[in-house]
Image (tube, grey):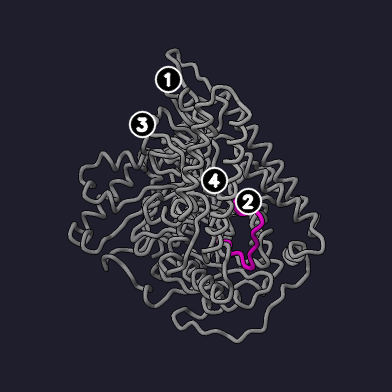
Amino acid sequence: MSISSLTLQQQLLRMEYDYEREEFQRDTRVMGIGRKVKRGLCWFPISLGRSYYNALGRFVTEIFRKQDHDITHNFEPGKPVCFFSEDASGSITYYPTLGTVSYVEDDRMVVALPSQEPVYVLQDKARVGVQLYFDEQTYRLMFQALNEVIHAKGNRLAQLRDVFHTSVKASWMQLPHVPFPWLNATQERAVNQILRARDVAVVHGPPGTGKTTTLLEAIYEVLRRESQVLVCAQSNMAVDWISEQLVDRGISVLRMGNPTRVNDKMLSFTYERSVENHPDYPDLWAIRRTIRQLQASARGRSESLHQKIARLRDRQTDLEARIRQEVLENVRVIACTLAGAGSPLLYGMHFHTLFIDEAAQALEAACWIAIRKADRVILAGDHQQLPPTIKNIEAERRGLAKTLMETIVESCPDAVTLLDTQYRMNETLMHFSSEWFYEGRIKCSPSVRSRSILELNKPIIWIDTSELDAKERFVGETYGRVNDVEAQLTIDCLLRFVEETGHQHMTEEGIDIGIISPYKAQVAQLRKLIRAEKALRPYRSAISVNTVDGFQGQERDVVIISLVRSNDDGQIGFLSDLRRMNVAMTRARHQLIILGNAHTLSSSPFYKALHEYVVSL
């Protein structure tokens, strides 16, 4: 059973790989630059900043986005990119050299390149752009991991495979119960389950139930018994978040790969900065510089010069290996994405315990990249929130979307602890999500049961647009949809809330507001309207606008959701993925405001029930 299910995963992953590769090739040939920009796949035009060699000896260059600042992009550290230029006639030329995103902000990123030559070429072009390239490397790592686990025999990897995918029972150590008075009962149970687990433990954390708090406590306790652990997550943002929390607890962390939120605090515990701070790094830098100078100034390739460079390269390799070993060994936590666990820098390393956060968002194959390095696995997440992103509908239908966490929840129910007390939402906000997604098992902490900003505010409001001429429209072929009337209503709603709450109350209480839409096009429209609204200028720092995915793991005092879909056919598209709506509606602490066409959305039993619940309040 275990081999057949993993073989099917391998086949479905191949379908997804072929589909995504073909889609990329087709889009590169057919899709215009403007559409790529709107989809967050491309920056154009760009300007080049300074170029330099980083601490790892890689040549990197800065890139700045010159326009379309409102569009949420998909560039992330580790992703491959290619460059292109546009001539006066509008003809596009792509360049063969690929780069890798080192780190990225909203409008600035640093790209690692194999040599300086691409920069010289691009500097001579008037209009230059950068776009995401097909990510072969992550797929290669996933295929390699699946192949290894399928063929594993007589080792720990084979044992874990059989526990996860067959009737083999997970095993447990007999340890005395450890009290944690600062945690609630289910959080305490989850930490103790983790300490006792020989094979696997799962922390199922619905919104606001303190999953991160529980995970941090578990990591801290495990580190009292082990010298080092590996902590992974599907996204860079999730790795950054857990890393920051661990550092705040006084735990030494090494962040492999560069973080998405580039600031001094984050950079201080990256692998690159740790190498720079090593006492032997100046010697390594001097050797690298000498090698480059010798290569650049050579008049022909004499035997003596070749030997000198070879000796310097040997010294460089030995010094790099020693620095890498000391940097990796002198920390308690190594943190990276699941794909990052396949980095050559971690070759040969093994960990007793692996923690995977956001496990319900990761493809099973991605999890195995990291699991190969561990004796036991702790997963944390919520399979009722955001699922993995899959483009091939057939592969998704046949089971590629089923995560390892879901499989373990079914095969090893004794390993699962549901955190059942939430501390984010008042009771009215929490109730519908608890009933629909968690069988009513989530209860509200007394500390937040009645929380509100203004006593007269209803916790949930649905502004129905079905009687208005608020129709959705396409923006491009695949970029998404916009509902202009609903976007303006969202701004009006925001203005009304600010006015009713009052400037003094807003600023003294530090009230923050999240505006969520499932569609990137609507997000861009909302950002544009907010920027143009003078009355909102004093509050811009307190207002965040993003997609559902962009708000995963976050919370705000007030959340406004613009659902966009409005048509006579009851078509709701990917709003039918209810897990995304669960994420959106559980970000609010005090008040939730939903804008949507109740007639269109009520074609779905979920939205019909949600609308009826809100109206009944």
Q: Which residue is mark 4?
A: 574
Q: Nearer the viewer, residue 160 or 5?
A: 160
Quarter containing the N terminus? bottom right
Q: Which segment is the magenta one?
A: 345-357
Look at the numbered disc 3 and give the secondary structure of its residue: loop
Residue 571 to residue 542: above or below: above
Amino acid at dot 1: Asp
Look at the numbered disc 2 and give the secondary structure of its residue: helix
Mark drawn on residue 586: none
Quarter containing the C terminus? bottom left
Earlier sequence position, callout 2 versus callout 4:
2
Look at the numbered disc 1 and give the secondary structure of its residue: loop
Q: Nearer the viewer, residue 397 or 554?
A: 554
In the rendered image, is residue 358 in sight? no
Q: Which residue is mark 2?
A: 342
Q: Residue at coordinates 48% horizontally, 74% vertically from top-left?
A: 421
* Magenta-colored stretch includes residue 349: yes
Earlier sequence position, callout 4 versus callout 1:
1
Amino acid at dot 3: Lys
Earlier sequence position, callout 2 versus callout 3:
3
Q: Which residue is mark 1?
A: 124
Q: Which residue is mark 3?
A: 66
Point out residue 298 in the picture as x, y percentages from the top left corner. 53, 26
Label 4 packing within 10 angstroms: few (<14), some (14-19), many (20+): few
Q: Nearer the viewer, mark 1 or mark 3?
A: 1
Amino acid at dot 4: Phe
Label 3 packing within 10 angstroms: few (<14), some (14-19), many (20+): few
